[in-house]
Image (tube, rainbow, N blue to C red):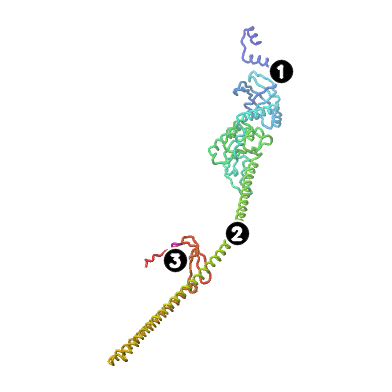
Amino acid sequence: MLFKEEYNSMNERLSLSELNGEVKKVLSTNFMAPIWVVGEISEITVHSNGHCYLTLIEKDNSDDRIIAQARATIWSYTFRMLRPYFETTTGQQLTDGIKVLLQVSVEFHELYGFSLNVRNIDPTYTLGDQARKRLEIIRRLTDEGVITMNKELELPLVPQKIAIISSPSAAGYQDFMEQLTNNASGFRFYTCLFPAVMQGNQSEQSIVDALDRIYPYEDFFDVVVIIRGGGSQVDLSCFDNYNVAYHVTQFPLPVLTGIGHEKDDSIVDLVAHTRLKTPTAVAEFILDGVSAFEERVNLLEQEAIEMVEARMEDEKNRLDQLIREMSLLVRNNLGSRKNELMQLTWKFRQETRLALQEGDNHLGKKIQKAGFLVNHYLFVRQQKIARAQYLLDFAIPRSMVFKRQRLDEYLEKVRRLSQKQIETEKHRIDFAAQKGELSDPGTILKKGYSITSYRGKMIKDLSVLKKDEIIETQFYIGSVLSKITEIKSEDKNDN
């Protein structure tokens, strides 16, 4: 207002330098002492002469729109003191993208315009702002219900195909591969590196891009490993990023982290399935899981072997018991069958003897009857001959003597024929007796023949037999049981 009033009163024109001079006077009058200013570092440049040049901005809280901007300078002698103080206290570098509380003196130069000269910095404000942002991101992930999604995935018992997100030149990646590849147990793994920038402004998008490249192979890989190998707080700031953390929560494979924080966990550590301190610890975790699985398999194998051996022992005992019982049954059955066979043999012999005896008696009766008939016949013939002789001697004339001689010859012939008939009958009787003796079962068995019976009856026809039936064969000494496996029948008309 002073300028306007003076200008109106003087009604004169000012040059640009004069105007800037007046502005400088006003600023110098109103900002005589240094003041504390909050701003976000948009750009930072350290000149070769040691001076540090900053661009400070302020963003709208609702849409991140820049609503204020100013240049600031930290002269080399001040920067040499403030920089290590800030980085030692906060654990991170003084870099772009962070909010700072600076003590500045307001300056205005006629040629270079408005600027701030940084005199001091309060690192505790930056720490508080980072913590606030971290809490806001964690709260946002919690409110969205995604903070534990990756933890809820089932970790494979034996993760063998591993997708790795890391920098190819990182020492942590080399340590991880050395530990995993040259393990003492000789386990083998398939690994594939998806390179990413692990610090700086490009790290956030680079890690997200690596996750996107792995996603099409979700059915192939078992786990994803994000490893780095430590660093300062600012180097690891990308792991406190909402975008990176959200992608991890949404990933369909378990994510293991070995970022190497020395102090607190990052937000990516919080949302990952399993957080481990270092890349080497990640490799050890995987190896321990495989070793535990191998131990469980070996234990199950041993238990299975013991169960099989116990079952085999039980079955062997049961089989031995069955064999003993079967042997006893077979012996009892053989004894019973042997007794039955002996009874049948004795009965057969008795019946045969009776049959032979009856045959002998019948034959004797026939012989006796035949002898009686023969004798009767001879007696009758002799009577007739005697009468004839009488007639010849006394009644028949001498001319009949010749006929008498012929009659004597005929009588002699009859006697011879009768004697022959008697000898023939006797021979037939002797033959029948001999045949009966040859038909005796004991005699037949003694000659090498055998008698086969089924269910106590002698077998004469194959039609009574069936497959898998048991038959008994009696020899002269002893008998055997046989199981029928095949029945072959021969047609009697084949010959």
Residue matched to label 2: 321
User: Which mark, by number, is residue 32?
Assistant: 1
Q: Nearer the viewer, mark 1 or mark 2?
A: 2
Q: What residue type is labelled 1?
A: Met
Q: Is mark 3 on a helix, strand or loop?
A: loop
Q: Contact, CB < 8 Å: mark 2 with mark 3?
A: no
Q: Which amino acid does label 2 sit on?
A: Gln
Total labels drawn: 3
Q: Position of residue 300 (x, y in %)?
A: 62, 49
Mark 3 / mark 1, whichever is N-terminal: 1
Few, some or many residues within 10 Å of mark 1 (<14, 14–19, 20+) = few
Q: Calculate the distance from the C-alpha at mark 2 to the C-alpha at mark 3.
A: 38 Å
Q: Where is residue 485 in the image (x, y as percent from the top left)?
A: 47, 61
Q: Which residue lies furthest to the bottom in this view?
A: 398
In percent of the image, x 68 and y 20: which residue is there? 106
Q: What residue type is labelled 3?
A: Lys
For residue 57, what is the image quadrant?
Answer: top right
User: Which mark, by number, is residue 460?
Assistant: 3
Q: Nearer the viewer, mark 2 or mark 3?
A: 3
Q: The N terminus is located in which quarter?
A: top right
Q: Calculate the distance from the C-alpha at mark 1 to the C-alpha at mark 2.
A: 113 Å
Q: Is mark 2 on a helix, strand or loop?
A: helix
Q: Which residues are drawn in magenta?
A: 460-464
Q: Calculate the distance from the C-alpha at mark 3 to the C-alpha at mark 1.
A: 141 Å
Classified by dominant secondary structure, the portion drawn in magenta counts as helix
Q: Residue furthest front?
A: 395
Q: Is mark 1 on a helix, strand or loop?
A: loop
Q: The C terminus is located in which quarter?
A: bottom left
Q: Is residue 118 above or below residue 209?
A: above
Asked whether, in this view, residue 32 is left or right of residue 141, the answer is right
Give the camera-side residue of 325 and 74: 325
